[in-house]
Image: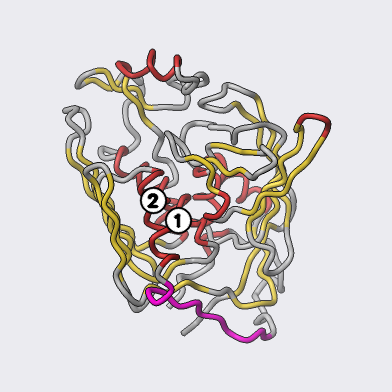
Amino acid sequence: MRFGFQTTLRDRVAICGVGVHSAAPAQVILHPAGVDAGVVFLRTGLPGGRERLLEAKRVNVAQTALCTMLGDASGASICTVEHLLAALSGLRIDNVLIEIDGPETPIMDGSAADFVAAIDSVGVAQQARPRRHLKIVKPVRVDHDGGFAEFLPAERGFRLDVEIDFESPAIGRQRRVFDLDPSTFRREIARARTFGFVCDVQKLWQAGYALGSSLENSVAIDGDAILNPEGLRYADEFVRHKALDAVGDLSLAGAPIIGLYRTYRPGHKLNALALEALFERRWAYEILEAPSQRVPMMARGAGAHVPAAAFAAPD
């Protein structure tokens, strides 16, 4: 098996925006990180000037209502992390420190496109240690609220099979299958925006959600009509966005998955339950590692500025 080498960012890059639920402004700074560091959030701006580190791993998932929130016992938390995590995972960035000064990751345009653009603006550095993988070897399935999710073995790569089913005629039943690699993520998934129903807005506001939602960062659905004047980016943008969410949520496994993830009527809760079920069944997966070795010479030099799409899928 070709493991590929770990990667980080070539330089730091900042992204600013507001949270879709909190409407709170936040600045995110992505910093390069060393080998085996993983993806870690540095939450600043806490009461009393405190700062907390939060690893982007499933054990730190604190809430999955309408978004994925990471938190710890001290009360430090960051919500709506899934789109940024999807960009990092989709482009195969292994090691990064994410400094954020607010309670919620900015929603930007409702997709992962701005995060991909930020990563591309600084480029990717290849590191001197092979990437580890989590390989599915036995099926694991969970059922929840009329939907299901299952991990199934595969010999190579990561396949994502997502199906949604809504009563709204604007959405209906949609299914997409992706063999995930950076090129596919960029082209087919990254630009798919979050969506919501106008009839739910008042209830969401009363519950403290969607306070920063607008037609600039969400696809709004009213009955069988799409209210955004520009329309959809893809005919099936809704299922593609659910795939985007799944890529971000499943990155909390802590290593790229080799296998198939099949899900019907997915959501953040179901994705989290699927990961929990997988890790409860140690016989269902293997951690694959390779010994360290020298980074092969690249055309532009080791650690050169290269686009994230240049890194091939594991096999």
Q: Quadrant of the C terminus?
A: bottom left
Residue found farthest to the right = 49
Indicate yes or no whether the magenta region holds residue 286.
Answer: yes
Relative placement, left or right, of 275 versus 168 is: right
Closer-to-camera residue (305/5): 5
Residue under pointer 2: 271
Image quadrant where residue 129 sits:
bottom right
Name the spot of residue 99 as percent of width and height, x first: 72, 43
The residue type indicated by label 1 comes to Leu
Name the spot of residue 255 as percent of width and height, x first: 53, 66
Image quadrant where residue 52 sits:
top right
Closer-to-camera residue (261/124): 261
The residue type indicated by label 2 comes to Asn
Q: Which of pointers 1 and 2 lies earlier in the amino acid sequence?
A: 1
Q: Residue sitting at 67 percent across and 80 percent down? A: 295
Q: Secondary structure at mark 2?
A: helix
Residue found farthest to the front = 73
Tag shown at residue 250:
1
- For the record, the magenta segment spans 282-293
**Mark-to-mark CA distance, 1 and 2:** 7 Å
